[in-house]
Image: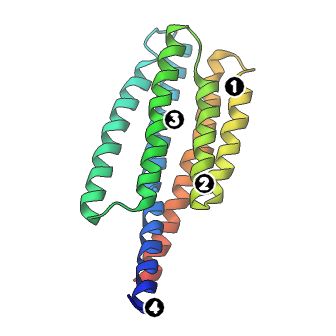
């Protein structure tokens, strides 16, 4: 292999890593919208209407988000015809996060503990790791929003924790996802 071929391989790998990073905007926007919807549903149904069914928004949103994410990820892999290294890193990291969340949520519900503060703090960790891996500062800043919001959620009344959660998701997921999507759009315009 000559120098030109080596450089081309490196350029291709860098291009795929950047494309992989930008495609993740879909997940941050999707989960941002779903989680804000679930938290608002809990707030209004459980805390304003005093209904025991406030949890349904979380169930419906979690199932729908999981299915949509899986279908989107599968279609993207087929469309591209390859799986970039960053896709594998993200998949393993966020897959482990998903398993951790299920365990945490089940244990919290069984023990009648509101999981929102814990979820926010753990989400901060994964968001920070994602931002550090991709060198995308808005995600790293979003992680600090999650950590601070998680700490705050421990000290506010339970009925307000879902609103703290909404604010954290909006600033920690949705806003960085939109910024990432804008970067993706700019990258496509510049490459055209």
Residue that label 2 marks: 131
The CA distance from mark 4 to mark 3 is 50 Å
The CA distance from mark 2 to mark 4 is 32 Å
Q: Position of residue 15 (x, y in %)?
A: 44, 74
Instruction: Look at discs 4 and 3 and give the one toward the viewer.
Output: 4
Q: Position of residue 187 (x, y in %)?
A: 48, 74
10 Å neighbourhood of mark 2: few (<14), some, or many (≥20)?
many
Q: Are marks 1 and 3 in contact (CB under 8 Å)?
A: no
Residue drawn 59% across the image and 24% down it: 116
| N-terminal-most mark, 1 or 3 | 3
Q: Are marks 4 and 3 in contact (CB under 8 Å)?
A: no
Horizontal side of residue 132 vs 83, given as left or right: right
Residue drawn 33% across the image and 34% down it: 64
The CA distance from mark 3 to mark 2 is 21 Å
Mark carried by residue 36: 3
| N-terminal-most mark, 3 or 2 | 3
Residue that label 1 marks: 153
Q: Position of residue 11 (x, y in %)?
A: 45, 80
Mark carried by residue 3: 4
Nearest to the observer: residue 133 or residue 153: 133
Horizontal side of residue 159 vs 190, given as left or right: right
Residue drawn 47% across the image and 25% down it: 41
| N-terminal-most mark, 2 or 4 | 4
Instruction: Look at discs 3 and 2 and give the one toward the viewer.
Output: 2
Residue drawn 49% across the image and 28% down it: 101
Above or below, comparing residue 61 to residue 125 in the picture: above
As helix, strand or loop, the secondary structure at mark 2 comes to: helix
| N-terminal-most mark, 2 or 1 | 2
10 Å neighbourhood of mark 1: few (<14), some, or many (≥20)?
many
The CA distance from mark 1 to mark 4 is 55 Å
Horizontal side of residue 151 vs 45, given as left or right: right
């Amino acid at each position: 292999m000559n120098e030109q071929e080596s450089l081309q391989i490196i350029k291709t790998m860098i291009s795929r890593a950047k494309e992989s990073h930008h495609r993740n905007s879909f997940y941050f926007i999707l989960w941002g919208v779903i989680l804000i919807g679930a938290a608002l549903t809990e707030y209004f149904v459980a805390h304003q209407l005093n209904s025991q069914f406030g949890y349904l928004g979380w169930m419906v949103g979690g199932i729908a988000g999981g299915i949509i994410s899986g279908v989107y990820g599968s279609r993207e892999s087929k469309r591209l015809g390859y799986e970039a290294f960053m896709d594998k890193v993200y998949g393993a990291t966020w897959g482990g996060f998903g398993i951790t969340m299920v365990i945490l949520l089940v244990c919290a519900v069984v023990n009648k503990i509101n999981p929102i503060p814990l979820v926010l703090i753990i989400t901060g960790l994964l968001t920070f790791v994602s931002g550090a891996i991709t060198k995308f500062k808005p995600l790293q800043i979003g992680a600090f929003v999650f950590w601070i919001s998680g700490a705050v959620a421990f000290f506010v009344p339970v009925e307000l924790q879902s609103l703290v959660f909404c604010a954290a998701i909006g600033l920690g997921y949705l806003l960085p996802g939109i910024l990432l999507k804008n970067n993706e759009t700019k990258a496509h315009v510049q490459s055209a």
